[in-house]
Image (tube, grey):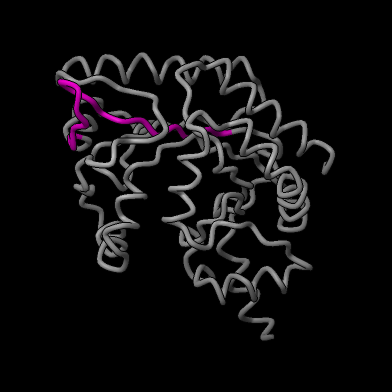
Amino acid sequence: MSQSALKAFLSHFKFQPERNGCIGIERERFLFANGALQPRSAEFLHRIGKPAWTYELSACQVEDRTQPSESLQLIKLNLLSNDSDGWWAVMAIGCELVACEVGPADMSLDVYPDQRYLEIVRAISVERLQAACRVAGTHIHIGTRNIEHALDVYHALREQLTTLCELGDHSNGERLALYRAMAIDWQPPRYENIEHFFGTARVGGFDLNLRNCWHLIRITPHGTVECRMFGMTPHVDETLEWVTRVRSISNGKG
């Protein structure tokens, strides 16, 4: 294995040691009106005009993000502030913001016009696109110091994958079944070392673009370990329970 190629791969990760242990959260939610999903994410985002909110693959979804923090109280305030902003924006456009983790089978397959998403749509079947559009989840990031620490945290969380999947399930397994249909390579593998991680990334096609990794647990370009198995809840305190469990598993790895 070329050391220069390995070095180039590792350069994609921007670790921030000062954010070690900090938590960031992403929540995907559906836009409803008159009892049906609405592909109006562009309209919502134009109305809200805040960087904490962004688009998702489905034009019927939007996502809010929190600032990294170690404080559960600050995380809670951030989540509630995002909720308040989101509710104001959907009221202004005549919609509802709904925290459900599975959309209906007959929902619109309109996609947000992002170049990467349009390329994904061209490359997958209609069945996989439908599965991808129907799922919404809560993604929890935990900051790590460096690649070695990230791998330690990743493996600790990987060992608890089944437990974490059960903890965040509000659809009797339907969301995760759809996720697995969409992301065929969903299972987070065990990495023997950094070189094995790089080799797996090359085989999986995410060595040049880490966003192309669809594992339920993954190491991200931000230097975080991301848990993608949690579904959706309208209750901020339940989201914080998920955060507490992720943190308790990760803390033993420094």
Q: Which residues are magenta?
A: 24-40
- Is residue 96 or residue 79 the one in the foreground? 96
Query: Where residue 114 sits: x, y (%)?
Result: 25, 53
Residue 156's spot in the image, x, y percent?
A: 77, 47
Tell me if residue 238 comes above or below residue 162 in the rendering: above
Question: Is 160 located above or below residue 246 in the figure?
Answer: below
Task: Report the residue at 68% width, 43% height from top.
Answer: 162
Q: Residue at x 71, y 58 (%)?
A: 147
- Give the residue at x 50% y 72%: 205
How many discs mark residues in the rendered view? 0
- 61 left or right of 177? left
Q: Position of residue 223 (x, y in %)?
A: 62, 50
Q: Is residue 35 magenta?
A: yes
Give the residue drawn at x 50%, y 33%: 231
* Image coords of residue 130 (percent x, y): 30, 50
User: Predominant secondary structure in magenta?
Assistant: strand
Q: Residue 203 appears in which quarter of the rendering?
A: bottom right
Quarter of the figure that contains the C terminus: top right
Task: Establish if 129 lies above or below 209.
Answer: above
Image-based side of 6 in relation to 76, left or right: right
Task: Decide if residue 39 is on the left or right side of residue 25.
Answer: left
Closer-to-camera residue (233/10) = 233
Q: Where is residue 253, by image quadrant? A: top right
Image quarter (top left, top right, bottom left or bottom right) of the N terminus: bottom right
Inspect the magenta stretch and tell me whether residue 202 lies in it.
no
Q: Residue furthest bottom?
A: 2
**Residue 223 sits above or below residue 120 on the image:** above
| Left-right relation of 42 to 151 | left
